[in-house]
Image: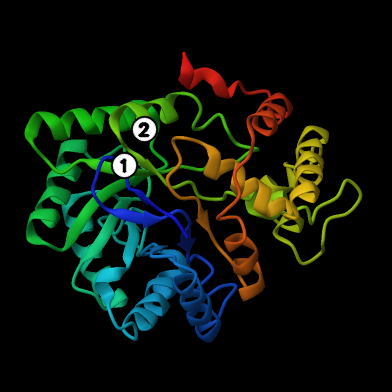
């Protein structure tokens, strides 16, 4: 497993980040611990969770596993805050009050003294950015948080946050976690990707396999009855002829390399110059093992151009 700097920081993270949203949902605690250990044994050091994943169970399971590790300092643990955790008027958002309350809960569930990367899960339109950033700066100065990042933030908003941090000498967002994959390029390209390249922001995309659609398990004729595509409208919406052609191309290219459709979809992300580490989740050890098989794969220029044509996006924008 190779390691990459997280944006312009000196922090090195593995080129795949393990997402733990399935902990307490698709994976029970023994399975979660097996997968986390397997990921670290393969060279991974970067694990991502959130305070709201499965009502805190994800952080709790990850924390129980973390407490068994011989050296906490070798791992990079990321979590998030924003979404409601109760019915009270202050139980949500990115206010100083909510952030300070929730960071303590995350630290307790994770059984650690500090969070390596603390991310704002979504934009809070009702709270001034400077309030959020000052609260985060205080957490960094207190040693409870090492680095800060954002998720689901548009390029203009991330730019505004960087300006505020620069103007007031506050800790800045050094990482962005967007929804990005071969079927959902518009949220990132070109604006957010160009900003990351220009300002040295690390990018750790979530849903790299489009909810399982980019594994090849869906066909033009059938949807597995136990899959998310049978219940999730967004994933069901992926079933277009254009998207099936993309899967067909990944399958064809993968056959020539001895790689699966999922591995080729991850390789496409790993080839992008602005992506630091795609976040891979899994319900089973077999799924995680398949994702880990992508770490040495990179696509050729011809393969990237073919996928550009199929997705209708010009990847060469960053060379202009």
> What residue lies at 48% left-to-right and 62% top-to-bottom?
19
Give the left or right position of residue 88, taking residue 145 as reference: right
> What residue lies at 31% left-to-right and 74% top-to-bottom?
110
* Image location (x, y in percent) of residue 150: 33, 45
Q: Residues within 10 Å of mark 1 (few under 14, many from 20)?
A: many
Depth order, front residue of 302/266: 302
Most extreme residue toward the right is 221
Q: Earlier in the sequence, mark 1 or mark 2?
A: 1
Above or below, 67 relative to 131: below
* Separation of marks 1 and 2 at Cα, in angstroms: 8 Å
* Image location (x, y in percent) of residue 10: 23, 49
* Image location (x, y in percent) of residue 256: 79, 47
* Image location (x, y in percent) of residue 265: 65, 46
Depth order, front residue of 36/130: 36
Q: Which mark is residue 7?
A: 1
Residue 91 figure quarter: bottom left
Task: Tell me the residue that label 2 is attached to.
Answer: 196
Pointer 1 with pointer 2, Cβ within 8 A? yes
Above or below, 73 relative to 70: above
The count of marks equals 2
Give the left or right position of residue 29, taking residue 75 as reference: right
> What residue lies at 47% left-to-right and 74% top-to-bottom?
41
Q: Say what secondary structure mark 2 lies in.
A: helix
Q: Residues within 10 Å of mark 2 (few under 14, many from 20)?
A: many
């Amino acid at each position: 497993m190779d390691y990459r700097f997280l944006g312009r920081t000196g922090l090195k993270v593995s080129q795949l980040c393990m997402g733990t949203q399935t902990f307490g949902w698709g994976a029970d605690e023994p399975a979660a611990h097996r997968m986390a250990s397997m990921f670290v044994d393969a060279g991974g050091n970067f694990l991502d969770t959130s305070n709201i994943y499965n009502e805190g169970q994800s952080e709790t399971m990850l924390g129980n596993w973390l407490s068994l590790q011989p050296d906490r300092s070798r791992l990079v643990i990321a979590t998030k805050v924003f979404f409601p955790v109760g019915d009270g008027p202050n139980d949500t958002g990115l206010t100083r009050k909510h952030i300070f309350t929730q960071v303590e809960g995350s630290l307790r569930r994770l059984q650690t003294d500090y969070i390596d990367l603390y991310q704002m899960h979504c934009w809070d339109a009702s709270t001034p950015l400077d309030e959020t950033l000052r609260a985060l700066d205080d957490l960094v100065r207190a040693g409870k948080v090492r680095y800060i990042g954002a998720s689901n933030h548009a390029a203009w908003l991330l730019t505004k946050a960087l300006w505020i941090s620069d103007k007031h000498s506050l800790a800045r967002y050094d990482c962005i976690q967007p929804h990005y994959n071969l079927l959902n390029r518009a949220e990132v390209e070109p604006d957010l990707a160009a900003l990351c390249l220009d300002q040295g922001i690390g990018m750790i995309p979530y849903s790299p396999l489009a909810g399982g659609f980019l594994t090849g398990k869906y066909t033009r004729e059938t949807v597995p009855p136990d899959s998310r595509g049978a219940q999730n409208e967004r994933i069901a919406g992926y079933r277009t002829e254009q998207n099936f052609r993309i899967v067909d191309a990944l399958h064809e290219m993968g056959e020539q390399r001895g790689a699966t459709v999922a591995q080729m979809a991850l390789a496409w992300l790993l080839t992008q110059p602005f992506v630091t580490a795609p976040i891979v989740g899994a319900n089973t050890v077999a799924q995680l093992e398949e994702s880990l098989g992508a770490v040495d794969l990179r696509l050729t220029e011809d393969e990237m151009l073919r996928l550009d044509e199929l997705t209708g996006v010009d990847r060469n924008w960053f060379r202009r």
